[in-house]
Amino acid sequence: METVKTYTVEEAKRRMEVFCAYQERYQAEVVEKLRQMRMIPLAIDEIMVYLIQNNFLNEERFAKSFVRGKLRYKKWGKIRIKRELKFRGLSTYIINSAMEEIDDEEYEEIFDSLAEKKQAEIKEKSVYKAKRKLADYLLYRGWESELVYSKVHELYED
C-alpha cells in the first residue's frame, strides 16, 4: 500500500513560496500544483490569496517575463506569444499590458536576424520551395504574415 504525502496549509504555503520564487508562475499552474499535492479547494483558495498578497504570484509580472523571454530566446513573434498567454488562461488586459514590453525596433531586429539566419540554412535549389520553407518557418514561430511575406520577397529578389 502506497502512502500519500499530505501537507498542512503552512507546509503547502512554504512549498509554493519556493515554487514561485524559483521562476515566475501563473495562477492556473500553481492551482494545478496544489491539486497534485491533494490540497482541498478551501486550502487552495487560502494559499492562493496568501501568495498573491505577498507578491509571490503576480500574473502581470509573469506575462511580462514570458513575453521578453519568448521573444529574445525562442525568437517567437507576437502572434505565437499572445496565443501561448491565452492558452495559459491570462486575461486580455494582462496580455495586452505584457505585449507593450516589446520594443518595435528590437522586435524588427530579432525578426530580421532570424529570417536571414534561416535563409542561410535553407539548402533548396528551387527558389519557390526555398521561399515557401522560409515563410512557413517564420509563420510557425508566430510572426505576422505581412512581415513574413515582405521579408521573403526582400531576401529572394530576382
Image (cartoon, rainbow, N blue to C red):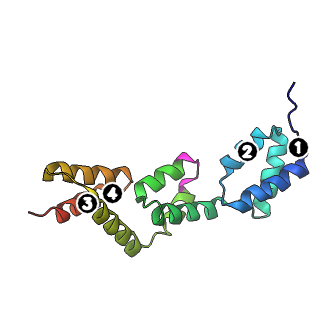
Cα gap from disc 4 to disc 2, whole angstroms? 35 Å
Marks 3/4: CA distance?
17 Å
Look at discs 3 and 4 and give the one toward the viewer.
3
Observer-nearest residue: 110 or 130? Answer: 130
Magenta highlight range:
87-92
Q: Are marks 3 and 1 in contact (CB under 8 Å)?
A: no
**Residue position for label 1:** 7
Among numbered discs 2 and 3, the one appearing first in the sequence: 2
Q: Which residue is mark 2?
A: 33
- Looking at marks 4 and 2 on the same chain, the residue that comes earlier in the sequence is marked by 2
Nearer to me, 52 or 69 = 69
CA gap between label 2 and label 3 equals 42 Å
Earlier-in-chain disc, 1 versus 2: 1
Q: Which residue in the structure is indicated by mark 4?
A: 144
In three-dimensional space, the C-alpha distance between marks 1 and 4, rounded to whole angstroms, equals: 47 Å
Helix, strand or loop at mark 3? helix
Badge 4 element: loop
Q: Name the residue beneath numbered marker 3.
A: 119
Secondary structure of residue under mark 1: loop
Q: Quadrant of the C terminus?
A: bottom left
